[in-house]
Amino acid sequence: MEEKLKQLESTFLSKISDVQTEHELGSLRAQFLGKSGSLSEVLKGLKDIDPKLRPVVGSLANQIRDRMESGIKAKQADLESLEIAKKIQEEKIDVSLPGRIRWMGTVHPLVQVQDRIVDIFSRLGFSYIQGPEIETDFCNFEALNIPKNHPSRDMQDTLYIDENRLLRTQTSSMQIRAMLSEPPPVRLVMTGAVFRSEAVDATHSAMFHQLECLCVDENVTMEDLKGTLEFFAREMFGNKTKIRLRGSFFPFTEPSVEVDCTCVFCSGKGCKVCKKSGWIEILGAGMVNPAVFEKVGYPSTVSGFALGIGIERVAMLLHDISDIRLFYENDIRFLRQFL
Ligand SMILES: [Zn+2]
């Protein structure tokens, strides 16, 4: 019996040295010290041996059990410190590594241009407003003197939501909303996205941005429009910038003009950008058509001017960008140039 106990202990010792995990240690403990473990099995034989020898064998069995218990405890401690050492190794921080650069968000180039233009008109006393992108047919067309069946409704391929609602095709719809909600005088600058059912290419987008100004009061004349445009052109493109007006047609202004300014790249001498003309078309404008005032219920004694600028067009001119799609792709390499 003593032999059996010693044999058991040596088997235990060889097995415990192979133990790698806490789970394996648990199994080993059950195998040797559990209720039906090997030690209990051996001790079942105690009743068959000489009663005189029982205390000696019993004492040996207790010593072996104690040694096994403390062996398991020691192994447990070893495994735990190994685990800790492993964790420390894994979570080691190399303080000499260079830091990660956190890129700050910045204002989109289109918004930068928009903010600059809004700021210029704010200094002339224009207040900034915004309006809904989903518009009624009345605000987007009817009240702007573009009746149903008017050819310009075909010109602007409109994205209709239903018979009466559409995605606004021009920011001019905000002029109507403003005049319907407040009496004259008004002096407003407004911006926003507009939508057309347009095939997308380098110079066309189904969604782009406009900025619009409206000034209505008594005795507002073409002269006021011209002075405003000259101020804007100088502030935007430099002190020496000149403008010229060419007759044009918009249903909501009468008379209507296209506005050119001297080329920013060649100062009017003629270059590739201005196609040797020295002039670049920047916006459309005109005196508000009295038919529009009638639609919004303004008195016939008022007059006013309106002007509209394509924000993408100005941004492309200023930054010499040839593809409008770059503005919408959110490519960080493109956007980073406008920090
Ligand atoms: Zn030029």
Image (cartoon, rainbow, N blue to C red):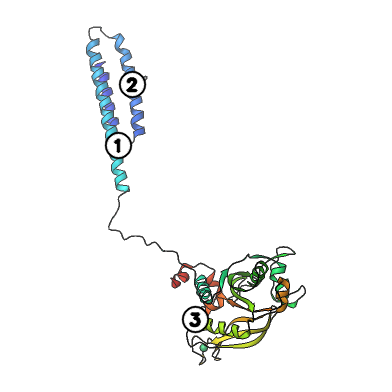
The percent coordinates of residue 303 (x first, y second) are: 66, 79
Where, by quadrant of the figure, is residue 323 drawn?
Answer: bottom right
Please tell me whether mark 3 sits on a helix, a strand or a loop. Answer: helix
Please tell me whether mark 2 sits on a helix, a strand or a loop. Answer: helix
Alpha carbon of mark 2 to alpha carbon of mark 3: how far?
96 Å
Alpha carbon of mark 2 to alpha carbon of mark 1: how far?
26 Å
The numbered dot on residue 144 is: none
Q: Is residue 169 visible?
A: no
The percent coordinates of residue 332 (x first, y second) are: 46, 67
Q: Is residue 324 left or right of residue 34?
A: right
Q: Which residue is mark 2?
A: 38
What type is the residue that disc 2 sits on? Ser
Outermost residue, right side? 149
The numbered dot on residue 235 is: 3
Tell me what residue is drawn at x 44 percent, y 70 percent.
Answer: 336
Q: Which residue is mark 1?
A: 80
